[in-house]
């Protein structure tokens, strides 16, 4: 440890400084300890609370949103049966015309198209029924 | 069990802490005072830093793991407190550390608690011309007569590096004094 100074430095200590130091230190220490910040445990507790609060709020908001969306979806869910056939036809007529034949064929591989042609979609009986129901025969006769 | 070990044990014991702390203050206040005084130069500032040092010791004694000796731990705290004190003041005054030291040195000329002669004043001037680490090593070795091993433990630098720092500091100071002695 540092020994008695070999070389003089010129600094001087006020008289009785060291004698009074301890009592002054005690006073300062007392004030420091009275103003002591929260203990480590208290700090941890408050941190946990402060972190949990936003977590609870987030969960509550997410739950409310989930319930709201579920209710709305249930109310708005429509089955295909509930949509008028005319609406579907109208939609397809308006939207499918936007696609060229080439674009449609790109979307469907050749084998799918063949399958579709061979399927019941073009069943003669069904086709005849459809035509009888939908075609105005008077127009055809006139033409 | 050594005296230091007994003291630490008492400091960690709630019912013995107060008394042990008083013993610690009584044992180390003077040595730490001079250590801090040579760093901050002004007595009042030294008093503030010394108080802060002991308060820190009181609050953090449970963190002392006994890996180093008690007095090296105390010196380390005192050194850090003094450096922090100077840095904070320089920041508050918006000046560099060098400028702050120059001002402190100027104040010494009218300081009632400095009775050094012109050579001692010049020596202080030479010291503040050194880089911070060299200043510290020089003061602790030259004035306080610490061994390089003690310095190594306090400053956390190898003894070899400290020897080198000290010798460079001595050379620079000698050169400075030779250069300026004709003016006195």
Image (cartoon, coloured by chain):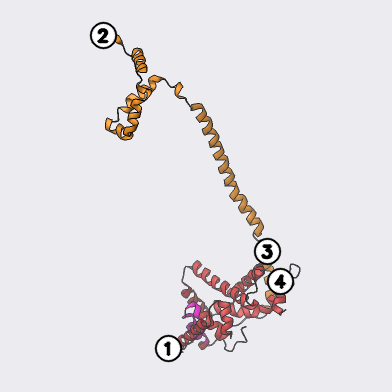
Image coordinates for residue A81, horizontal then vertical, percent: 45, 21
Mark 4 and mark 2 residues within 8 Å of each other at the beta carbon:
no
Dot 3: element: helix
Asked if the residue at tag 2 contacts the one at tag 3, i.e. Cβ–Cβ closer than 8 Å, the answer is no
Q: Secondary structure at mark 1?
A: helix
Asked if the residues shown at circle 1 and circle 3 are in contact, with their CB atoms under 8 angstroms apart, the answer is no
At a point 61% along the width and 72% down the height, the residue shown is B48
Q: Is residue B109 visible?
A: no
| x and y percentages locating residue B174 in the rendered image | 47, 89
Q: Nearer the observer, disc 4 or disc 3? A: 4
Q: Is residue A55 above or below residue B174?
A: above
Q: Which residue is mark 4?
A: B11
Residue B35 tag number: none
Provide the residue span drawn in magenta.
B120-134
Q: Label 2: how many residues lie within 10 Å, few (<14), some (14-19) or many (20+)?
A: few
Q: Are marks 1 and 3 on the same chain?
A: no
Chain ID of residue with mark 1: B
Q: In which image quadrant can residue A17 be found? A: bottom right
Q: Position of residue B79 (x, y in %)?
A: 57, 75
In the rendered structure, does residue A74 fall within the stretch colored magenta? no
Q: Is residue B139 left or right of residue B69?
A: left
Give the residue number, with chain letter if any, for mark 2. A141
Q: Are marks 1 and 2 on the same chain?
A: no
Q: Is residue A66 left or right of residue B54?
A: left
> Real-space Cα distance between discs 4 and 3?
16 Å
Residue B123 painted magenta = yes
Find chain B in the image and tell me its colour. red
Q: Which residue is mark 1?
A: B179
Q: Which residue is mark 3?
A: A33
- What is the secondary structure assignment of the residue under circle 2? helix
Specify the quadrant that holds the N terminus of chain A. bottom right
Out of A21 and A75, give the one closest to the viewer: A75
């Amino acid at each position: 440890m540092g020994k008695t100074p070999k070389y003089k430095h010129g600094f001087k200590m006020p008289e009785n400084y060291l004698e009074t130091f301890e009592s002054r230190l005690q006073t300062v220490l007392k004030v420091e300890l009275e103003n002591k910040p929260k203990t480590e445990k208290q700090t941890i507790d408050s941190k946990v609370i402060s972190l949990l609060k936003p977590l609870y709020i987030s969960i509550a908001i997410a739950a409310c949103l989930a319930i709201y969306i579920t209710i709305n979806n249930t109310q708005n869910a429509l089955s295909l049966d509930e949509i008028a056939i005319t609406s579907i036809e109208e939609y397809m007529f308006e939207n499918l015309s936007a696609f060229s034949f080439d674009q449609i064929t790109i979307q469907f591989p050749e084998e799918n198209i063949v399958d579709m042609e061979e399927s019941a979609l073009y069943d003669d009986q069904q086709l005849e029924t459809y035509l009888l129901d939908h075609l105005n025969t008077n127009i055809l006769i006139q033409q | 069990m050594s005296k230091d070990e007994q003291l630490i044990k008492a400091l960690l014991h709630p019912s013995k802490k107060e008394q042990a702390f008083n013993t610690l203050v009584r044992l180390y206040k003077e040595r730490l005072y001079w250590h801090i005084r040579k760093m901050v130069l002004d007595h009042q500032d030294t008093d503030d830093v010394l108080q802060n040092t002991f308060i820190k010791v009181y609050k953090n004694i449970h963190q002392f793991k006994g890996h180093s000796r008690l007095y090296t731990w105390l010196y380390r705290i005192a050194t850090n407190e003094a450096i922090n004190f100077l840095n904070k003041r320089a920041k508050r005054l918006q000046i560099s550390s060098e400028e702050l030291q120059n001002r402190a040195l100027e104040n010494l000329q009218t300081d009632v608690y400095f009775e050094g002669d012109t050579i001692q004043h010049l020596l202080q001037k030479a010291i503040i011309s050194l880089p911070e680490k060299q200043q510290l090593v020089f003061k602790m070795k030259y004035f306080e007569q610490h061994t390089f091993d003690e310095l190594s433990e306090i400053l956390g630098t190898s003894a070899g590096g400290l020897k080198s720092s000290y010798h460079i500091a001595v050379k620079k100071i000698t050169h400075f004094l030779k250069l300026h002695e004709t003016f006195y």
